[in-house]
Image (spheres, rainbow, N blue to C red):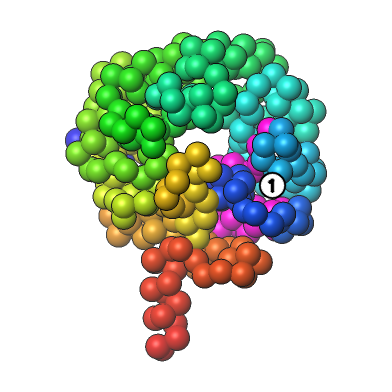
Amino acid sequence: MTLPKRVKLVEVGPRDGLQNEPVPVPTAVKVELIHRLQDAGLTYIEATAFVSPKWVPQMADNAQVMAGISRKPGVCYPVLVPNRKGLEAARAAGCEEVVVFAAATEAFSQKNTNCSIAEGLARFTEVAREARAHGLRVRGDISVGLGCPYEGEVRPEAVVSIARALDEMGCYEITIADTIGAGTAGKTRAVFEAVMRHLPVKRLAGHFHDTYGQAIANTYAALECGVGVFDSSVAGLGGCPYAKGATGNVATEDVLYLLDGLGIETGVDMAKLIAAGDYICGVLGRPTSSRAARAFAAKRQAA
């Protein structure tokens, strides 16, 4: 299959990238990061999550973040919602797109959401129905699609089952996530090909973590399958609190470097993207995890 001519990058740094930070990140910093990311040309920016502050204290300022964003025409700001209460809060904050999520294994579902896969899907079916009734778009995420910290290998058929359920509840796009970064190019190809037998590839997305250094290879494998949407996090921010040893999401800068090298259009400006990563890393007090950003910085210093 020929590679896509254009790819949509879904920037998850402000939500997935920051949610596990131990020290509260000021609301103004989150808003500024979103502004810098949209100025870099990103048109899908996962802004926050409407979850219980008891479980994810970093997202307690979700409504304030949404109120502080200077919304740019053509930019979408999806938010994560775990239940109807979260959906109601997201609607009150003026959100136009929500993200629901389900796990491909029972053990991860119990650890992540304290319920079985079936219970979680039933809950999200209700959330999706209500969201769509109020004109909101719904995106679906499948956690541990390429490996589980508790059950190990994940069969493609298990991912297919969740993908079909998310499709039935009305998710316009479905993301297969390698939550613990255990996937390889072969496994990536196998799971996408399995799901593509039931859903068109244009409705699928990839979300890769780089624990074993395979995220870029997995991105390319998905591209070869025809996937044209990828989640990524500026500066490689983020991880998974329920998967020990799992490193951050693949860096948006690294994915962009791959896509630019392949001549695939994204509309994203590398220099502005790197600057946005430098900004948030400066606030957090640590270096970027993006190899591309580090290489460009070394090149600038050597010039």
| Residue closest to the eye, 109 or 214 | 109
State whether residue 73 appears in this view.
no
Q: Is residue 240 left or right of residue 71?
A: left
Asked where in the image residue 85 lies, by quadrant, the reply is: top right
Check the image and report above or below for 18 versus 51. Answer: below
Q: Residue at x 46, y 52 (%)?
A: 248
Give yes or no for residue 49 being in the magenta stretch.
yes
Residue 14 x, y percent position in the rendering: 61, 49
Q: Where is the N terminus found, in terms of image quarters?
A: top left
Q: Residue at x 42, y 50 (%)?
A: 245
Q: Within 10 angstroms of label 1, few (less than 14), some, or many (20 or more) residues?
A: many
| Residue closest to the eye, 38 or 185 | 185
Q: Residue at x 28, y 24 (%)?
A: 156
The amino acid sitting under disc 1 is: Gln
Residue 257 x, y percent position in the rendering: 36, 60
Give yes or no for residue 73 being in the magenta stretch.
no
Residue found farthest to the bottom: 303
Q: Is residue 153 left or right of residue 13?
A: left
Check the image and report above or below for 283 versus 47. Answer: below
Residue 44 x, y percent position in the rendering: 55, 42
Check the image and report above or below for 40 versus 99. Answer: below
**Label 1 belongs to which residue?**
58
| Element marked by disc 1 | helix
Asked where in the image residue 80 lies, by quadrant, the reply is: top right
| Residue closest to the eye, 98 or 210 | 210
| Residue closest to the eye, 202 or 109 | 109
Q: Is residue 31 left or right of residue 284?
A: right
Q: Where is the C terminus found, in terms of image quarters?
A: bottom left
Asked where in the image residue 96 lies, by quadrant, the reply is: top right
The boundaries of the magenta stretch are: 30-51
State whether residue 220 appears in this view.
yes
Residue 263 x, y percent position in the rendering: 31, 55
